[in-house]
Image (cartoon, coloured by chain):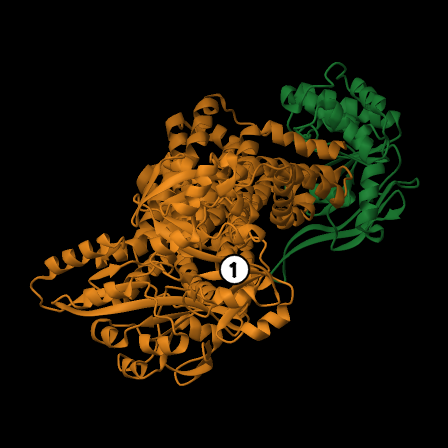
Amino acid sequence: MRTVTRSFLRYLYRRRSLSLLQLLGIACGVAAVIGMALSAKSALSSFSQAVEFLRGKSSHTLERLAGPLDEAILREIVSDPAVTSFAPVVERRLKLANGDLVRILGIDPFLDRAIRPEISRAPFEQRSGGSFEDSLAFLLDEKAILLEENLARELGLAKGGALNTLKGRLKVIGTFPNPSGEPLILMDIAHAQKLLELPGKIDHVDLILSDEGGFVSRWQEGYRIQSKRQRQETFGAMVGAFRLNLEALSLMALFVSVFLIYNTAMFAVVSRRRDAGVLRSLGASRGEVARAFLSEIALFGIFGGLLGSVFGFLLSRALTDIIGGTISSLYFFLRPTPMPWSWWIPAAGVIVGLGASFLGSLLPLLELSHADPVLTLRGRSGSRGNRRRAWFVALAGVFFLVASIIVLAFFSKQIYVAFIGVFGFLFGLSLLTGIIMVLAEPLLRRLLGGMGKLPGRIAAGNIIQNLGRTGVAVAAFMVALSMSIGLGSMIGSFRESLIWWMGTQLRGDMYISNASDMEVPKDFYAEIRSIPGIGGVDTYRKVPVLYRGRTVHVAAIKADVLQRFARFGWVAGGDEHWEAVKKGDVIVSESFARSFGTGPGSEVTLDGVAGPVRLRIEGVFYDYSTEHGLIMMDRETYIGLYGDRTINSIAVFIDPGEPRRKQILDDVRSRALSRGLPAFTREQFHSNILEVFDSTFAVTRSMRVIAIVIAFFGITGALLTLFIERQRDFGILRALGFSTGQVAGMTLLEAIGMGFVSFVFSSGVGTLLAILLIRVINLRSFNWTIFYYPDWQPYALTALTALAASIGAALYPIWKVHRTYPQMQIREE
Amino acid sequence: MSPLSPTSPIVRIVDLWKEYHENGQVVTQALRGANLEAAPGEVLALFGKSGSGKTTLLNMLAGLDRPTRGLIEIDGKDLEALGEAGRTELRRHRLGFVFQFFNLLPTLTAFENVYLALELAGKLHPEAARAALDKVGLKGKENRYPHELSGGEQQRIAIARAIVKEPALILADEPTGNLDTVTGNQILELLTERCREAAMSLIMVTHTPLACKYADRILTMVDGVITEDEKCN
C-alpha cells in the first residue's frame, strides 16, 4: 500500500471512537435500506406466492362480474371443449373466536387434483396425520376441516381438536403444509357452502384451458375470465402504490444515510486537510490525495455496508411482520416469512454502502483535492472564516430549491420525478443550514450564554466558528428531524382526514359484518329492517371490477338511506346528488375521478351481465376506502347491472330521537351474533378502521426512528470531531483556569445548541415537507386529497427527540473531556 | 546591492509580484517586484519582519502559490510554463520543504514520513530513508510516531524527509522557529551541512541571527522587496 494512502487510513485506528461512530452511522443507513428492501421483498413475494398457491396450476379463472356463480354453470364448463381441467372453489374469510380472520377454501378434492395437487392430496395423505377414516370424514363430516400446520401450531390445535369460529365449532381432522405460509382452512366445498350459507353457489372456477380464444369467445358475456398473467398484473397493480411507498421510505432512509456519509466525509476532510497540504508540498498530486481519501471512504463503505447488511437482516425480521400486517389489513391476508440469510445480502450491503459513500463523499473529495495547500499549511484555516462560504453554499441551495420547485410544479406527474423533486427540495433547504446558523448566532449566544454563562457563550462561538464541521452535522440532524416532523404531520393530517371522512360516510349506529368477502343473509337484512325504531338500513356490497384494464371497485348502497343519514364530503356540489343516484346515475370517488380523468357529467361504461352499460357520473366524493377508485351506485342499479343480490355488510341507522336506542342496538347485535355475524357500534367500527390505519403506518414510524438514530451518530461524530480538533483550544482554556466541569458543560451546550438550531430549522422544513408529501406525493400515489391539519404533537415529539439525541450525543464526548482534559497542554502538534 | 548570483542559478526570480484582491481592489501587496538568484549548493538566509512576504516567496518557489506577475525559474524551468502537473513533478524530484511546525504526518512513523518523500519521487529505496534518519541522528527511532518525539527530533525527521531524495533546492520556513536555541543551532548545522555535502541549495526564511553563521548569503525582505546584506544586523 502506498504511504500516502497509509497515512490517511491510519486515522481510522488513531481516532477509533470517531471511526466507530461513523461506521455505525453508515451501517444504520445501510441497515434501513437493506431491512426495508428485504422485508418488502419477502412480504411482496409471499403475497404473490400466496396468490399463486391458491390459484395452483390453473391457467385461467372464471368468475361472475360481481357476486358468486351458480354451481349449475359447472355442467356447461365440463362440456366445453376448451376445458382440460376445472375446479370449483368457495373462497371466503372466516372469523375465528379469537377475532382473527382466516381464509377458508372450499374445494372438491377430486376435481382439484389437476389444479392444486398439494392441497387436494392433503385430505388423503398419511403425513397430515390422517387415516382412511379421516379422508372419508373430510367428505362426509360437514364440520370437518384441515388446518394449515403453522396456524394449527399457533392455535395449539392438533388432529381431533376443535376450532371455534363465529360460524360454530369445526372439527380438525388433520393438518397440511402451505409453502406460502398463509394461514388456511380447507373444507369440502359442499360443507363450505353450507357453513357459509351459500347453497348452490361457488366463488370462482379455476381452469386449465387448451384453447383460450375459443373459451373466451363462448364465455365473455357476463363473466370475467382472467389469465394467469392478467391475475399477476391485477395483483401487482393492487399493491403498486404500497410498493411505491415502501420504496420511498427506503429512499428516505438512504437519503439520510448519504447525508450522514457526507457529514462523515466532511469531518474526514477537515482533519485531513492539513495532511493534504503537506502531501501536496512534498509532491503528491491531487489524484494521489484523492485516491488516499477514497480508499478511506471505500473502507467505511465496505465495512459499514457489511455491518449494515447484518443489522438490516435483523431489522427485516421485525419489519416483515409489520409490512405483512399492513398488506393483510389493506389487500390480502398474509403472514409473510422473512427472507432467509443469503450471501447476496452482505453483497448488496456493500454495494449500497459503497454507492452511498461515494455519493456522499463526492463534494468533500472535490474540496480536499482542490484544497489550496498554502492555506491548509497555515493550519486550521479550513474551518475559519467560512461565513462567506456559507453564503455560497446557500446560493447553491437556492438553485436546488428553484430547480426542485420547477420539477414539482411542471414535471411531477410521474411519481418518481415527484420524489426526486421532494428530495431535491430537502437537499436545497439543507444547504441553507450554514447561513441559518450564521444568522442565528446572536440568538444562540443569548440562549447558550443564559444557560451556561461564559462556557455557554464560548460554546455558541465554537458552533459558529467551526461551521465546516458543525454545519454539516446540523444539516444532517435537521434533515432527520424534518422527516420526523414531515412524516408525523402527514400521518396526523391523514388520520384527521380519515376521521372526518368516517364522520361523513360511516354514520350508521351499528355495522353488521365489514369484510367484502363475507355475506349477510338477505332474510337477516329483512329481519333487521322490520325492527321498530330503526330508521334505515343501508346494504353494502363491494366488488372489484375491471375498468379500462385496471381494477376498480363498484359499491352498491341504498341511496335513499344514505341521503337521509349520511353527509358525504363532496368534491363539488352537495347532497342533491342522491336524487340522481336513486334514478340510476353513479357517484365516483376522488381517486377514481383523478385516475381516469373523469368528473360530473361524464360517463363510465361497465360490463354488465347483459353487456356494456353506460352510467352517468353525477358527483365526486372524498373517499379513503380504496386508492384504486370506487364507483358507487344504488343497489337497484347494481342488481340491474350484475344480477348480484349479495350483501357484504349492513349499516343500521336508528331514528333520531328514538328513546330505546340502546335496547334496539343490543337487540340487533344479539341477532347478528346468533347468525355468526360480527356487529360493531359506530365507535367500534371507526376505531377498527383507525387501528388498521395506525398499523399501516407502523413501517413509516420505524423509518422515522432509524432516521433519528442515524442523525444521532452524526451529531455525536460532530461533537467528537470538535473535541479532537480543538485540543489546543482546550489547552488554552485549561491554562486560563477553566475546570473540567466547565469544559464538559461547554461540550453539552454545544450539543444542545446544535440540536436547538436543527430543531428550529426543521420545524419550518418539516412543515414544508409535510405539505409536499400531502399535496404532491400522496396525491400522485393514491389520487386522494389529504387535508392539512396543523398539529403540535409531531413538533413536540421532535423537540423532545432533538433534546434527548443532543444530550445523548454529548455523553461520549463529555466522557472524553473528563478523561483527557486534566492532562491537556498548550501545544501545536 | 543586487541579490544576484554570478554563477548559473538554480533559482531565478525576476520582478516578482504577489497581490491579494478583494472586490476587485488590491488590498495587500505581499511581493512588490522581488528579484533573486541562488547558485547550486548555495545557502541563503532570508530575514524579514512578519508580513514582509517571506513565506509567500517560499510558497511561490515551491509552486504552491502563483505570482500575480513576474518570472520564477527553478533549475532553469519557468514554473508558470510547467503547469500544475509539471510543478508537482518538480516538487517530487527537485524540491525539499522544511516547515516551522515540522508538518510531519502524524499517522506515519519517522521512517514512513521519510520514505514517503522517496516513494513520491519514485525511488523505492527504504535503505535510503534509514540512512537519512541515521544522518540526522535518529537511528533507532525509525518506528516512533511524531507525537512520541521531541520538537528537535521531529524537525530532524523533517530534514531527513527533505534531503533524502537529494533535491536541487531545499526551502526551509523558519526551521528553528519552534525550537530552543541549542536545538535550533544543532538543526541549522545539520541542515546546512547536509545541503553542502550533497550540493543542494538552501533558502531558509528565518528570524534567528544564528542563521548568519551558516549562510553563504544574507538576504532581507522589506515590504515585498529582497535586498542583500553583507552581514547580520
- Residue B37 lies in what quarter of the image? top right
Q: Quadrant of residue A424?
A: bottom right
Chain displayed in orange: A
Q: Is residue A183 left or right of residue A292?
A: left
Q: Compare residues A164 and A189 and report the one nearer the observer.
A: A189
Q: Is residue B81 left or right of residue B148?
A: right
What residue is drawn where x is 70% and y is 23%?
B109
Give the position of the N terminus of chain B as an image quadrant: top right
For residue A266, which quarter of the picture? top right
From the top left corner, tell me how far across and down residue B87 is, in percent: 81, 46
Q: Which residue is mark 1?
A: A235
- Residue A331 in the image, given as x and y percentages of width and height: 44, 56
Q: Is residue A619 above or below residue A825?
A: below
Picture coordinates of residue B207, whole percent (x, y):
68, 32
A48 up-or-down from A14: above or below? below
Badge 1 element: helix
Extreme-bottom residue of the structure: A601
Chain in green in the render? B
From the top left corner, tell me how far across and down residue A363 is, in percent.
63, 50
